[in-house]
Image (spheres, helix red, strand yellow):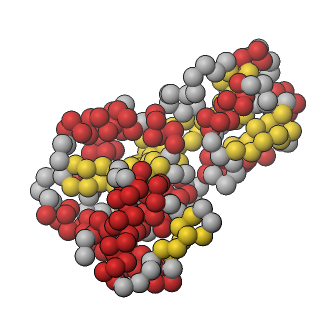
């Protein structure tokens, strides 16, 4: 049984479509479909069915996927063991959106130059999803917002950067008092389901401000665009560029606002890819 077929099955189950699985695996949708058909023929059962616009595992498929995740993790471990004396093999990392565009490009370029034998897979997502994938063994490490709780002792967290929160406002309002803007203008909220959004929620409570909420979004760049269009103000982390192009917004410090979004790498302390993860952390801290 070709483990690439199992990898394709897991990818379709995780992302709900062959097209997205193909994009993640850097192959064509036809190749993904062929792998799934070959796997179903070998096992003699249907593994995936279509439910509306998404692909869902059958009962048999769910059972196979559960074991497939373990087999794929074991395969990566075997490769790491075989290459234990050199920084080589596969490194599966996750990263939040602003880290994908603002931190990883330079880091990946230096890693590729210094460690040409390392194959890197990048999984974008939000911090909560990526944390769970590290816990579940699907990712070797992830660039995330520091959890608002103490992670288990089996995990390590290495701080990469701190991003102070600022008030994003239309540039025409740059000379106005930030606290008055927060209290009086429509507020575009950073989604409270995200750890960064919870920081904002707690800070507003401490400031005693109940803003006039207009929208709540989980995409920071989209929030910045809405501010640019004059739809309100927002508390955003001052993340590394690039920001969306052509924005006419001001980033104002807020008196009494003492919160920062701490971005770092989280990984299992017992990981056999420790050398690769430490190389990733070192390169990220060099930027």
> Is 115 left, or right, of 182 in this rendering?
left
Q: 240 or 8, which lies in front?
A: 8
Tell me the residue at 34%/75% (across/down).
39
The percent position of residue 29, horizontal first and vertical second, equals 41, 56
Q: Quadrant of the N terminus?
A: bottom left
* Residue ID at (61%, 19%): 246
188 horizontally vs 44: left or right: right
Question: Residue at the spot x=68%, y=35% of the render?
Answer: 223
Vertical placement of residue 216 versus 92, above or below: above
Q: Quadrant of residue 172?
A: top right
Q: Quadrant of residue 34?
A: bottom left
Q: Is residue 135 visible?
A: no
Q: Nearer the viewer, residue 230 or 18?
A: 18
As displayed, is residue 65 above or below residue 170?
below
Horizontal side of residue 212 vs 102, given as left or right: right
**Closer to the camera, 151 or 13?**
13
Q: Position of residue 134 (x, y in %)?
A: 43, 62
Residue 31 image point, x, y percent: 34, 59
């Amino acid at each position: 049984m070709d483990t690439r077929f199992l990898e394709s099955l897991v990818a379709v189950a995780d992302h709900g479509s062959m097209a997205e699985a193909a994009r993640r695996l850097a192959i064509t949708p036809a190749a993904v479909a062929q792998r799934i058909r070959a796997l179903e023929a070998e096992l003699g059962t249907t593994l995936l069915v279509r439910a509306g616009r998404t692909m869902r595992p059958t009962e048999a498929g769910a059972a196979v996927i559960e074991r497939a995740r373990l087999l794929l993790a074991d395969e990566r471990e075997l490769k790491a063991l075989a290459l234990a004396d050199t920084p080589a093999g596969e490194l599966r990392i996750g990263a939040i959106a602003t880290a994908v565009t603002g931190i990883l490009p330079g880091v990946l370029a230096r890693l590729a130059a210094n460690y040409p034998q390392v194959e890197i897979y990048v999984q974008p997502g939000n911090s909560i999803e990526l944390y769970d994938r590290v816990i579940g063994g699907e990712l070797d490490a992830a660039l995330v917002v520091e959890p608002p709780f103490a992670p288990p002792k089996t995990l390590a967290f290495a701080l990469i950067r701190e991003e102070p929160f600022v008030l994003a406002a239309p540039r025409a309002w740059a000379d106005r008092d930030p606290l008055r803007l927060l209290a009086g203008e429509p507020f575009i909220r950073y989604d409270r389901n995200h750890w960064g959004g919870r920081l904002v929620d707690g800070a507003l409570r401490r400031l005693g401000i109940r803003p006039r909420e207009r929208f709540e979004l989980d995409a920071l760049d989209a929030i910045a665009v809405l501010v640019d269009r004059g739809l309100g103000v927002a508390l955003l982390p001052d993340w590394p560029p690039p920001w969306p192009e052509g924005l006419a917004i001001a980033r104002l410090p807020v008196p009494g606002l003492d919160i920062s979004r701490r971005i770092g790498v989280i990984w299992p302390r017992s990981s056999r890819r420790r050398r690769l993860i430490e190389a990733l952390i070192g390169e990220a801290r060099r930027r």
